[in-house]
Amino acid sequence: MNILEVHNVSKHFTGHTALDDVSLNVPQGSVYGLLGPNGAGKTTLIRIINHITAPDSGHVLFDGHRLVEGDVASIGYLPEERGLYKKMKVGEQALFFAMLKGMSRKEATARLKEWFEKFDILDWWNKKVEELSKGMAQKVQFIVTVLHRPKLLIFDEPFSGFDPINANLLKEEILTLHREGATVIFSTHNMASVEALCDEITLINNSHNILSGNVAEIRNRLGGNRTAFTVSGDTAVVAEHLGNLGARFESSLLDNGDTRLLVTPATGATMRPIIEAVNSHLDIKSIEPAIPSMEEIFINTVKQNSQQ
Amino acid sequence: MSNKTGIIIRREYLERVKKKSFIITTILMPVLMLGMMCLPALLMNVNISDARRIGVIDNSGVIAPQLVDTDLAHYTRVDISPDSMYARTDYDGFVIINSDIVRNPSGVTLYTREASSMELEQSLNDNIADAIESERLKAIDMTNVRNILDSVRADVNMSTFRLTDEAGTSGTSSAISYAIGLIMSIVLYMFLLMYGQMVMTSIIEEKNNRVLELVVTSVKPTQLMMGKIIGVGLVAVTQLALWAVLMVVLSASVVPLFFSPEIAGEIAAYNSGSLDAATASIDIEGLQALSIIGNPAYIAGIFGYLLLFLVGGFLLYAALYAAIGSSVDNIQDGSQLQSFVIIPLIVGFIVSTTIAANPTSSLAVWLSMIPFTSPMVMMTRIPFGIPTWEIIVSLILLYLSFIAVVWFAAKVYRVGIFMHGKKPTVKQLIQWARYK
């Protein structure tokens, strides 16, 4: 069951196309990564999902039905660029945002107090926002995003601007909300967090969806069957043998004097003759499958896509 | 109107009304305006300079005795030669009257140490003219000629009444209408400019500190824009209403306190058209002014129209200001695009001064129908008493064009708030309005 389905969405502005026939599915209960370089069209897509702008063509299904304005009450979106009214008091402002999400004043006050207590910021309630530091303001922004217990949470670069301690606090809170049943979408180019958190991703480049799927599956698929050897000795001696087997390889020197040898066998070939060839000329310390990091996949895929 | 727009309106309204600056201007403004109106009158009563000592060298011998001292000058007859007057620093000036002055009235010369004033010259001129006149009368061989002339002389005091539909009459005064019309026009111009710009700067601010990005996650941009316009508009209405209440209360309670029973009676007589001008204790023009200022119904009526035109004009201009505010990043860029909005506003205001002098000219009628100038121009015309249908047509046109402008502004706004960087051209704004 998908909580969100984007079908063939396109959006054009004068002079450029923000999204061109983009489709993707976000499974219910997943942690989803929306990746892509700056200006790829991620924010435009999120704005369409949040009913802020309308697509030129295509449509979005939310929870099985066509997205309607009322659905924003079931979505919590924390934009990358975000601010608060500087002259307003923190508590009053949080109430304002909560009521815009359709909560009653009483309900909103009770839940806000809970969250403020959890973040240990209850004494900020009557402070003006301009007295807060950037990190403090971000906590308030986070609270108003998740306060109405949305089914779908969308975070656009949520950890930028947070110190490591608060970033971790935030991550824990997001994961708690996820465990409680919320589907989470991260829009980011912080690949380390994608590997750690996301089950599924979509990579958007130049307004196209160029890669979609399960993170583990993508890493295995795009890693091919590369194998990484850690060896001691001069790797030049195996070059000829590997060449004869039709395999491609690259080597890099490690800090401890060993060499890391990355070998990709010829199409359809197995690893065995390669291991034998290496073993007969060099001392092997370890052999392991070389699964690329999301960062490598991101960079390579975007590069290939841009060259086309 | 959706609940969300209501929440936006509430925030926009309370944020402004609770500000100290709002409370202070609301109370101080009427006091300042009243002060400004009273200032010229006060200044006239203050004797700014001391009377000048003027020596009179009267070669005819008949003028000097008839010169009357005034606040401006004290006259003393001196018998010195014109050459020696330079040395007499105890006088501020000298007037030399030729011996044949009665026959040839141009034989008068005034010398002063400091620049003389127009008032002094005028008063001296009148004084000498009177003296010459009475000298000439003496030469006519006729008894009581002065008395006869006095009895013939007439001072005209015109009372004006307007024929109204109810076959009755109501007292009007062009001068009072002129003043009220201009004040209304100034108030409108001030409000439209001040509160329109408030909408613009507040949108630029929201855009710059990116709070907009957070707000539009739960509210449609159009709702946000309308909420802001209406919220700020209600602040303007609140301020105006407070002023109106203040002035109606003053008009009903304080002004009559200054009336003696005699004057109150005269005002009543004036309003019923039975006043005998010859027996009135103050002049008609003053009586008209008092009768209007002391009439709460009239003042409430004027404020009622003012409110209708203020709301319509504000909605129209605020929508344009909102579109501009959404499309730029800072006030400097905004002020350039703003000229498209300010020019019609200024035209309406400046033309009002001309129109107050001739409120039924075809220029006046046209400009009071065209939505961008109609609030100011119509408010200038209303005190003169114009057909109600003209006011209704003007209001309908104003509100219709507001709907059209809001439609356009909303389209620009929802794109503009996410655009950062280069200031857009008008052509681009129109392109934005075409986006789906």
Image: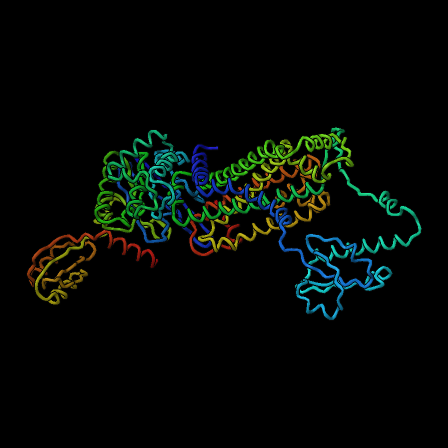
- In the image, taking residue A90 as reference, residue A246 lies left or right, namely left
- In the image, taking residue A32 as reference, residue B42 lies left or right, namely right
- Residue farthest to the front, as pictured: B79
Q: Is residue B300 above or below residue A292?
A: above
Number of numbered markers: 0
- Residue farthest to the right, as pictured: B141
Q: Is residue A2 visible?
A: no
Q: Is residue B70 visible?
A: yes
Name which residue lies at 43% across and 38% down: B18
Q: Position of residue B405 (x, y in %)?
A: 55, 43
- In the image, taking residue A177 as reference, residue A278 lies left or right, namely left
Indicate the quadrant where residue B361 lies: top right
Name which residue lies at 50% across and 39% down: B235
Q: Position of residue A278 (x, y in %)?
A: 10, 60
Q: Position of residue A301 (x, y in %)?
A: 29, 54
| Colour basis | rainbow
- In the image, taking residue B335 as reference, residue B83 lies left or right, namely right
Name the residue nearer the viewer: B50 or B355.
Answer: B50
Name the residue nearer the viewer: B372 or B345.
Answer: B345
Q: Position of residue B313 (x, y in %)?
A: 58, 42
Name the residue nearer the viewer: A246 or B297.
Answer: B297
